[in-house]
Structures are given as C-alpha cells and as structure tokens.
Image (cartoon, rainbow, N blue to C red):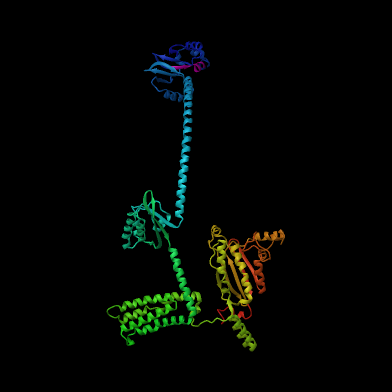
C-alpha cells in the first residue's frame, strides 16, 4: 500500500487517488513510523468543503490526516483485531488498520476485505456446523428413540409394580417377607406401617415382633425361625411354622398371622400375612353377648316372677340381711359369719346363672373370690373387715348391666313388681259388649272408657316400625340415613280406625328417602352431614286433636319443577303457574297421577302415594300442611282428631 511522508502536500495524495481509483486510502509515515491515515472518502469530503482545495492541496497532509488511526502489531490475533476494529468510533469504522512490526510500518488491513473474507470463512464454518448439526440431530433422534423404548419398558415395569403394590396396600392386610437373615425386605404393604406404626424395612423381624410378645415367647420365635431356615424338608418346616404365634396383640389390636415358605432365586424366604381381626373379634363378642341377652330375655319373659323375686332378694340381702350377719351382736363368730356370707353369695350366684342373668352372676363370682381370700387366711377376719366388705357389697352395681338390658328391651315396667297378662282383642271387645248390655248410665261409660284404653296403642309405637323400613330402603338406594327418631308426647289411640292412615305413611317415608334425602357425596358437597335424617314428632296442641310431623333434612321441594310438571300435564296454564302461592303448589303433590319423577321405579314415580295419604287423612277428618325450604328439608304436618273417649285418656302414659 502506498505511503506518504507527513510533510508532502495534499496534491500528491489527490494525484495518487486519481491514478489508483481502487485505493481506499494511504498511510502517512514519519521516520518510517506510521503517524496517520488518509481515507479516500474523508479526503475528498475535506477538499469539497468551502476553500478546501485552497487549504489542503498545497499544504502538508498532516493537516488532513487521521492522526489516531488503529495501529496493531503483526503478532495480534486476527479475532482480536476484528473485535477492536468493530468497536471503533462509527465514523472510522471502515478505516484501514495499520499493521506494524516493532513499531515500523509493515502494511494495512482493509476492513471491508477482512469482513468479506471473514464472512466467507464463517460461511464455510456454518456449512460444516450444519453438517455436524444434522449428524447430531440424527444421533439425537436415535438416542431419543432408544430412551423412549427404555422408558416405555421401565414404565411398564413400574405400572406392574405399582399395580401389585396397590393391590397389596389396599388388601387390608400386612404383607412382608424375609430370608434366612430374618431382615424384613423393603417391599412390604402399607398395612404393615399402620399395624406397627413405623417403617419395618431393613429391620429384624423377631425384633419388630418382640415388643408385642410375652417375654417367654420372644426367644422361642427367634429359635423357631432359625429352625425353619435350617432345613429343606417340608414336613419339618411345617412343624416349625405351627410353633409360631397365630394371633398377636399389636398396639391394642388383635392381629391374625399366617406364615408361608416361598422359594425365590434359589433361596427360601418366608412371607408373613398379617390380618387385623380386631373388628371381627369385637363383632364375635358382640354377637355372643347378644345371643346371651336373647336367652336372658327369653328366660325373663317366661320366668318373670322368679327374676323379679331374685332381684328383690339380692337387694334385701345387700341392704339388710348381710349387715345382720356381720353384726357383732349376731351371736356368731366372725368365721361363722364369713362362712354364712360365702354360702349366701354362692347361692345367689347360682340362682342368677340359672335365670340367665350371667353378668350379675359374674359380678357375684368376683365377690365370692374376695370372700374366699379372706377365708384362706390363717386367722379369721375381724368384724370391722367383714363390715367393710359388706359396705362394698352394692346390689345396684351388681345388677346394673343385666337390669339395663332387660329394661331396655322389655321396658321399665318389667321390674315394677307386677306380672303382665296377654289378652286377645276379641276378648276385650266381647267384654265391652257385655258391659254395654248389662250396665247403663255414667257407670257404663266410665267402665267402657277404661276397657277401650286397654286396647289403645302409643302413636309413637305405631310409627317406630318404619325405622327398619327406612334402613332397608336406604341400603337399596345406597344412601346413608340415621335411625328414625320418634319423639314427642305419649298419645294413646285406638289402632283399628287409624290402621289405614298408618299404612299410608309408607308413601311419605318412601318419598323422603327417595326424593328428599341426597346421596352422601351431594350432602358433603353442600356442607351437610353425610348422614341424612328423617324424624317423627307427636304433640297435642289441642285437647281434641293430635298433630304428627314427619320431617327430613334433604334437598326440599323444587317448586319450579312441580309447577312445570303441572303445566306439562295440562293441570294449569303457564300464566296461572307463575302466580300460584307456594302453599297451593304443595297441594299439587297430593293429586292423583301426579309425580315429579320422569321414570317409574319400584319405589316411586306413579303419582298415587301421597294421594292415598291425603285420602286416609281426610277419611279420619284430619288435614295436611307442608313446609319446605330448598337445601334444608321438608315437613309434613298431619292433624288428626281424637275420638271422644281418647281425649281424656289419650295423653297419658296409659289409662289402665
């Protein structure tokens, strides 16, 4: 590249540019050292300015040169040169770069040409990178395909393992296994954690069991398990397994244990299956108690006088006779008094066992044991000790459980001191006719009223059987309903004229559990208890009438749906439906062939149930009213008149 001395005139540079139109610029030297740079475009811009030719053509070029050009040593890396050049002042971005060697001018680098060459080099690099990228893409796709195949196999294995684990975790049993080292495998079911209340993987099975075994059984279990793995003979293994405990008590729960030898990978392992039978045992005990209670009630009914007599005798003995026996003034020695007490308690124990009052007999057996301990001492007890024992002898406590069972089933009157007598209704009706024929006046009316009271029923007792019906229908509909609650006054009524009404109420109960009470999931979603409630309440707001209310806490009556059904059936015009009071809407439910259900089911949908209830109510001279609130439930109020002779005796516990 052509160089000029700093003292040469601008006309020489102009002549050079004119002779060499492709030259981009020239380097200005001073003592062979580059001191400036003149680029063609910048040179002619200055010449083209006002008085430019006069100023610069005849003067030294140092006046128009770029005195701060980019000068680099030849040893500088090309990449570094490009970075430095591209970060210059934008007005000199495309100026040539002067190259020196030990501060002496060596040459120039054209930025334009440098960028073109760099671009060509980058293009070749990009082509090479694209080729490598395609190779990598194909390799990556192949690797992804292999990985997906591996993941699919792993997922399949995980699904199988999860399915097996899920099956074991939800089987309600504890599954675990161990080998000859007796260390529990990490693969065990969730029930094991719930039973032992801790993770058991990696722990010694005998040590896990030790806290739940009697002290003498702990060593035995370890020895038996060692014996199981020390032999390959199935018969010997079977003998050893029979020595292991089949029932365990783990954290107050009764657990049944089964042991099986399994062979895996040429080694024997033992699988243990643990089943929580606490509830089963409780039910078995409850069933045994109920069977015992049934026997006790049957005996009590057939031998009521003996049962009530034995109860009174025990109470008298505890309150009076026992105290006379242990009195120092009895004339007997303490040893004789103790023997008499022992004999009496033993006799009472046998009597109550014979009568089927087994709980009382068991309590008396405990008392007998205490007296036996006193009698076993070398010296007889003192009068004070005997008196203290009698003070603890409480007949009410001894009888409490059996008395509660009998009164709960047979009523409080069972121990009232009077026996009951069953009489056929026809006998009472015949007796009423005889009285009507033989007597007259006030005396006849009083006696007839008393006789009629004998065949009256508590209205609540007539409603109680619907509890079992509701329970059966709830199971059928897969709903959860609490036991039927029947509350209120004890109103005794003649059953015969009201039998049809009582039977018709089945439609009310059926509609409540079918239409009213929601499924458990729906109730929980609405913020209600999952258990629905249906209740009956009896009251006498007036002397001559009884009011029965049957209610539920379900979804309530959908008034809009009732009206739409009425319009669809042609019972009314849409305009009439819009203005109808709610009380009149409820009356539509009691029309024949009216139902809000779209399909007929074995339970409802025919539209005859509530119509039958209304007919029976009106036959008795009564009336019905309905209350309902969306999401809160419905109440049916039945007001029925009492018969004349019921008005004086109906609201009593029992006139007779």
- Residue visible at 45% across and 58% down? 172
Which residue occupies the foreground of this view, 417 or 651?
417
Quarter-of-image position of residue 475: bottom right
Q: Does the magenta stretch include residue 49?
A: no
Tell me if I can see residue 396 in this picture.
no
Which residue occupies the foreground of this view, 161 or 87?
161
Which residue occupies the foreground of this view, 397 or 178?
178
Image location of residue 631, percent across then percent down: 58, 61
Span of residues in magenta: 36-44
Which residue occupies the foreground of this view, 619 or 228?
228
Quarter-of-image position of residue 559: bottom right
Quadrant assignment for the N terminus? top left
Q: In this figure, what is the number of numbered marks?
A: 0
Q: In this view, does 392 lie to the left or right of 569?
A: left
Q: In this view, does 34 lie above or below 493?
A: above
Image location of residue 123, percent across then percent down: 49, 24
Q: Does the magenta stretch include residue 40?
A: yes
Image location of residue 430, percent across then percent down: 62, 84
Tell me if I can see residue 225 in this picture.
yes
Q: Is residue 121 left or right of residue 373?
A: right
């Amino acid at each position: 590249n052509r160089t000029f001395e700093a003292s040469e005139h601008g006309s020489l540079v102009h002549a050079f540019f004119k002779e060499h139109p492709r030259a981009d610029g020239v380097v200005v030297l001073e003592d062979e050292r580059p001191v400036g740079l003149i680029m063609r475009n910048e040179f002619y811009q200055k010449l083209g300015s006002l008085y430019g030719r006069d100023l610069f053509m005849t003067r030294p070029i140092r006046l128009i040169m770029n005195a701060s050009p980019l000068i680099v040593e030849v040893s500088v890396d090309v990449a570094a040169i490009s970075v430095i050049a591209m970060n210059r002042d934008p007005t000199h971005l495309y100026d040539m770069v002067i190259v020196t060697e030990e501060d002496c001018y060596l040459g120039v680098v054209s930025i334009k040409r440098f960028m073109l060459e760099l671009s060509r080099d980058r293009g070749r690099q990009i082509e090479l990178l694209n080729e490598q990228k395609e190779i990598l893409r194909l390799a990556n796709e192949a690797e992804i395909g292999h990985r997906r195949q591996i993941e699919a196999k792993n997922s399949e294995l995980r699904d199988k393992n999860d399915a097996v684990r899920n099956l074991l975790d939800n089987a309600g049993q504890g599954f675990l296994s161990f080998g000859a080292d007796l260390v529990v495998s990490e693969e065990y079911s969730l029930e094991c954690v719930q039973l032992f209340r801790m993770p058991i993987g990696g722990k010694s099975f005998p040590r896990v069991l030790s806290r739940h075994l009697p002290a003498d059984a702990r060593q035995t279990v370890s020895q038996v398990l060692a014996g199981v793995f020390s032999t390959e003979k199935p018969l010997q293994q079977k003998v050893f397994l029979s020595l292991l405990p089949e029932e365990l008590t783990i954290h107050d729960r009764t657990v049944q244990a089964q042991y099986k030898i399994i062979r895996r990978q040429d080694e024997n392992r033992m699988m243990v299956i643990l089943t929580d039978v606490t509830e089963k045992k409780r039910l078995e005990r409850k069933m045994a108690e109920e069977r015992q209670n049934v026997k006790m009630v049957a005996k009590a009914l057939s031998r009521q006088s003996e049962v009530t007599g034995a109860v009174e005798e025990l109470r008298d003995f505890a309150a009076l006779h026992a105290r006379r026996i242990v009195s120092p003034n009895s004339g007997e020695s303490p040893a004789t008094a103790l023997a008499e007490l022992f004999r009496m308690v033993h006799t009472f124990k046998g009597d109550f066992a014979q009568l089927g009052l087994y709980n009382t007999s068991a309590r008396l057996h405990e008392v007998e044991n205490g007296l036996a301990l006193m009698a076993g001492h070398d010296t007889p007890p003192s009068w004070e000790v005997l008196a203290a024992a009698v003070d603890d002898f409480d007949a009410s406590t001894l009888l409490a459980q059996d008395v509660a069972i009998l009164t709960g089933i047979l009523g409080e009157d069972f121990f009232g001191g009077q026996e009951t007598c069953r009489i056929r209704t026809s006998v009472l009706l015949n007796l009423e006719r005889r009285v009507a024929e033989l007597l007259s006046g006030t005396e006849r009316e009083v006696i007839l009223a008393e006789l009629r009271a004998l065949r009256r029923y508590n209205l609540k007792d007539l409603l109680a059987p619907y509890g079992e019906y509701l329970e059966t229908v709830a199971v059928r509909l897969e709903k959860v309903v609490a036991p039927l609650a029947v509350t209120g006054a004890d109103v005794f009524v003649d059953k015969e004229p009201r039998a049809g009404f009582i039977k018709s109420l089945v439609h009310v109960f059926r509609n409540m559990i079918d239409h009213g009470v929601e499924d458990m999931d729906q109730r929980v979603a609405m913020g209600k208890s999952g258990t629905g409630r249906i209740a009956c309440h009896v009251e006498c707001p007036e002397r001559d009438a009884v009011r029965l209310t049957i209610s539920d806490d379900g979804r309530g009556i959908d008034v809009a749906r009732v009206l739409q059904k009425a319009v669809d059936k042609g019972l009314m015009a849409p305009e009439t439906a819009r203005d109808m009071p709610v009380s009149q809407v409820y009356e539509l439910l009691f029309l024949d062939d009216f139902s809000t259900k779209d399909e007929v089911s074995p339970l409802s949908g025919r539209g005859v149930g509530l119509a039958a209830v209304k007919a029976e109510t009106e036959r008795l001279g009564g009336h019905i009213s309905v209350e309902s609130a969306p999401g809160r439930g419905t109440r049916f109020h039945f007001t029925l008149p009492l018969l004349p002779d019921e008005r004086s005796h109906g609201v009593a516990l029992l006139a007779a």
